[in-house]
Amino acid sequence: MITLALSKGRILDETLPLLAAAGITVDPAVLDSRKLILPTADPGLRLIIVRASDVPTYVQYGAADIGVAGKDVLLEHGGEGLYQPIDLRIGRCRLCVAVRRGFDYTASVRSGARLRVATKYTLVAREHFAAKGVHVDPIKLYGSMELAPLVGLADAIVDVVSTGSTLKANDLVEVEDIMPISARLVVNQAAFKTKRVALAPLLAALERAVEHSVEHSVEQSGVPPAALSGRVGASS
Ligand code: PRT
Ligand code: MG
């Protein structure tokens, strides 16, 4: 039996079509239930529903063999005990730095002031600013990061942005693009060897499903997705 860890919301919603293309379907009644262990039409594969930031932990410890997690979540986790063989090209967004409209970020950085940065991604933020020689005090939050600069908790936020409408609605502006983000298939390193016979065809089918959906989106828009975000074949 293979166990796949996923989070409800955009990750599950965007993974289901890839699974379907790989020939694996899930009963809609099961998806609507509050169950946390979901069977699929393939008796050799079940899904478990966990918090997005917990996916790497379940897979690292082998409670799930594979999982789907955003690169943002994987960077913050560290990726210990995990292989990341497939960029699923779903859950696309970008990690960025944003401040209140009117806050002079450039001047503040130039003056060498310590910036208070509210974020769910304290490790990533620390590394990003250290590499630029900017002094920061990361403030760990678990959600609604956009609020922090508005009420004086922080000077800046590091968060993922997709359409930009949340920033806009809260009078924040993006001042730095850190990196493009998409979701990765992660595999427990031990399971990759011990369950290779069961995993190999599933990984191959998912890879084909991703390629097919990429070709399809090129046909529809005329623009290769790699030109929109990230590199072709990026897997780290
Ligand atoms: O919600 P919960 O706290 O349980 O966990 P989560 O927020 O990590 O889960 P979820 O399902 O919201 O996100 C799962 C993964 O989706 C993330 O780890 C990202 O890799 C990816 N992803 C893609 C996003 C977004 N797009 C996104 N827009 N994750 C979050 N957002 C949020 C963002 O934090 C901000 O608050 O949406 C808001 C901005 O959206 P726009 O469209 O207004 O820019
Ligand atoms: Mg969320």
Image (spheres, helix red, strand yellow):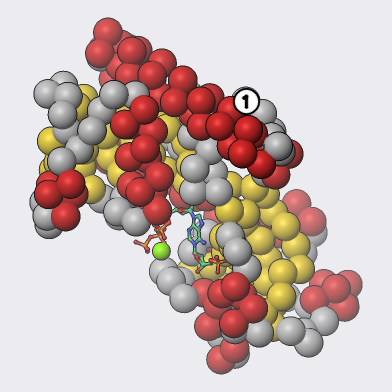
Quadrant of the drawing holding the N terminus: top left
Of residues 186 and 201, the one drawn nearer to the viewer in this rendering: 201
Q: Amino acid at mark 1?
A: Gly
Residue under the image location 62 percent in, 68 percent down? 164
- The answer to whether 200 is drawn above or below residue 176 in the figure is above
How many neighbours does mark 1 have within 10 angstroms: few (below 14), some (14-19), or many (20 or more)?
A: few
Q: Position of residue 198 (x, y in %)?
A: 25, 13
Q: Look at the image and tell me whether residue 97 can be seen.
A: yes
Q: Position of residue 109 (x, y in %)?
A: 82, 72
Residue 48 in which image quadrant: top left
**Which residue is at the far front?**
220
Of residues 89 and 24, the one drawn nearer to the viewer in this rendering: 24
Of residues 222 and 2, the one drawn nearer to the viewer in this rendering: 222
Residue under the image location 18 percent in, 46 percent down? 28
Quadrant of the drawing holding the C terminus: top right
Residue under the image location 48 percent in, 69 percent down? 140
Q: Left or right of 172: which side holds 236?
A: left
- The answer to whether 33 is drawn above or below residue 135 in the figure is above
- The answer to whether 205 is drawn above or below residue 88 in the figure is above
Q: Look at the image and tell me whether residue 83 can be seen.
A: no
The residue singled out by tag 1 in the image is 233
Of residues 120 and 115, the one drawn nearer to the viewer in this rendering: 120
Residue 99 in which image quadrant: bottom right
Q: Position of residue 108 (x, y in %)?
A: 82, 78
Q: Left or right of 159: which side holds 16?
A: left
Q: Position of residue 189 (x, y in %)?
A: 36, 22
